[in-house]
Amino acid sequence: MKIFETENDIKDNRLNAKGLSLIPTMGNLHEGHLSLIKAAKNYNNKTIVSIYINPLQFGPNEDFKNYPRTEASDIKKLKKIDCDYAFIPQDNFAKELKLIKAPSISKKLCGKNRPGHFDGVLTIINKIFSVILPSYAFFGLKDYQQFILIREFTKNYFPGIKIIGLPIIREKDGLAMSSRNNLLTRDERKIAPNIYESLKWIKNNRREFSITELVKISSEKLERNNIQIDYLGIFDKQSLKEAKNFEEGALIAIAAKLGKVRLIDNIILDKN
Ligand code: AMP
């Protein structure tokens, strides 16, 4: 696997002339990331994974400093699954970038308590896309709001790049895989599966209760388990507006804190 550290390296090697599938990550790779890479490998292109912990998407009191940094083992994992290239820029990659203002959907869900987060995400994605110019870029639906923002942004500014969204990969106990799971204490890790349980409970009981009742009952249960909810609700899949019934909404989504660690998860309802 060839590793690039600068944008000039990539340009000099004219990587995009060969057709590329890109998987942007912040490293600390787990099976969720690897599932994207495996899917990308089926697209008949060379596969490039970027690893960059983007300072622009962290707020002042967030976990940028503690975010797990595991470059050596990440590289091993990439080599093992036969990834073709990695792009691992220096820390100052995001310096002096002109901040992109994300559209109003960015103010909903995660944007409410993380002002500027999606501006930071789109700014770095814009930069990585312009350096690599892939044919396809792969994202996990765990970060659903990020996915729809990037999909819209790409339609407008990089029409040549196709965005692919892929399902959430979970631990055996249902917890959505996340680099932040490594920041949980043992006790927090034990209660963390309640997050997915609450989403499943809402899905399975959606014909028995109103949305208000569903959210109230599952919020109370989570709070009894010391899980602090940032948001929990049912939303329209496109507009992310809160839904009053399940005809209006197909996304059950949550963000919650266990101690200092903020986790997100969701279920997208199919027609049944
Ligand atoms: P991150 O390194 O957290 O920025 O994630 C990089 C990419 O991996 C994003 O597109 C995420 O949505 C995706 N991803 C993270 N966790 C999972 C998971 N459990 N299942 C599927 N995709 C994931």
Image: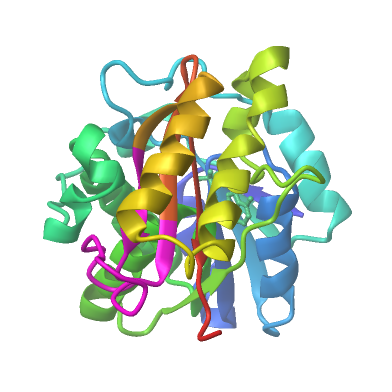
Q: Quadrant of the C terminus?
A: bottom right
Say which residue appears at 21% left-offset and 78% top-offset. 156
Secondary structure that dominates the magenta span = loop
178 displayed left or right of 109 = right
- For this view, does 130 lie left or right of residue 107? right
Residue furthest right as drawn: 80
Specify the quadrant of the image occupied by residue 110.
top left
| Front residue of 174 and 132 | 174
Image quarter where the N terminus lies is bottom right
Q: Nearer the viewer, residue 260 or 73?
A: 260
Residue occupying image coordinates x 49% and y 80%: 135
Position of residue 245 in the picture relative to residue 41 (left or right) = left
Q: Would you say residue 249 sits in the magenta stretch?
A: yes
Count of marks, rendered view = 0
Q: Position of residue 217 (x, y in %)?
A: 44, 41
> In percent of the image, x 51 and y 56: which residue is there?
202
Q: Position of residue 219 (x, y in %)?
A: 42, 36
Report if residue 213 lies within the magenta region. Answer: no
Residue at position x 42%, y 22% in the image? 64
Instruction: Relative to 19, say whether 2 is above or below.
Output: above
> 119 or 211, which is in the foreground?
211
Image spot of residue 187 (x, y percent)? 69, 14
Residue 103 in view: no
Report the coloring of the rendering: rainbow
Closer to us: 191 or 151? 191
- Can you give x and y, in whole percent of width and height, for residue 235 in the image? 31, 63
Q: Is residue 31 visible?
A: yes
Q: What's the magenta region?
A: 231-252
